[in-house]
Image (cartoon, rainbow, N blue to C red):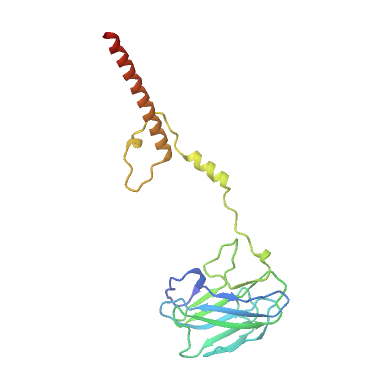
Amino acid sequence: MVAGAGGVLLPTPASAHVRLLSEGAEAGKPATLKFRVPSEKEVSTTVRIAITLPEGVSADSVPAVKGWTISRAAGNGMANGGSSIVWTAKPGNEVQPAETQTFTVRAAPLPKVGILRFDTAQTYSDGSVVNWNQPTTGGQEPEFPSPELVLDPDAVPEAPPGGEPEEQSHSAINEAPELSATPRADMAAEPAEGQDIPLAVVSVAGTLAAVGLAALARRLRRRSAHSGRKH
């Protein structure tokens, strides 16, 4: 959620959220965690990043970031709360709008869990704070997702199943209008330019045309036979 002073976020895709990258991370082994942080506001810059380490995760070391100071805190009151690592920009080193900065943590052996969530608080120069702390549920990503590290793919919640294809097809058929042997006025109307003609209408119209031609042919044959008998 967004708190503090106002500010318009840039119209960036979902991939612009704070992301956690950790190649080859495994439960029970050390890992290098890289947090990619975008600055999404049109005018304000990112001046502070606070990442909360989940329970069971500790940092062996935190590599320096040029132009930023690093500090640690016992906790920041966030729901996923363990200790926090805080990066603060020195003047002139803030993350500019539409730019990104990577913050790295070298973690001790990771706990044996399925998913680790690293709640992140991003502070802008206008005083506003964006809390990236919403868990992904049901396969749907929330507006402000917490950066996650998946150690066991089986722990990822599945998206809720949609309607069965058979049921959807059956519903569509039931909602279709019934066809009549008598042509309706709307069948005779010319379709608008670029508009598709329903197949059902084409089928009925073709059938009616064929029946009409056959009846006309029979009338012509009877008329011809009657004329021959007169002569």
Q: Residue at x 42, y 30 (%)?
A: 180
Quarter occupied by the C terminus? top left
Q: Is 225 drawn above or below residue 155 in the view shown? A: above
Whether residue 1 is visible to the viewer of this picture, yes or no, is: no
Q: Quadrant of residue 6?
A: bottom left
Query: What x and y, as percent, mark residue 162?
Result: 57, 52
Whether residue 192 is visible to the viewer of this picture, yes or no, is: yes
Q: Residue furthest top?
A: 230
Q: Is 161 drawn above or below residue 139 in the view shown? A: above
Number of residue marks: 0
Q: Residue at x 65, y 78 (%)?
A: 82
Q: Quadrant of residue 55?
A: bottom right
Q: Which of the pair 76/193 is nearer the observer? A: 193
Query: What x and y, as percent, mark residue 106?
Result: 65, 83
Q: Is 216 drawn above or below residue 62 in the view shown? A: above
Query: What x and y, as percent, mark residue 51?
Result: 59, 80
Query: What x and y, as percent, mark residue 225?
Result: 32, 13
Q: Residue at x 62, y 85 (%)?
A: 73
Q: Which of the pair 8/152 is nearer the observer? A: 152
Q: Which of the pair 79/225 is nearer the observer? A: 225
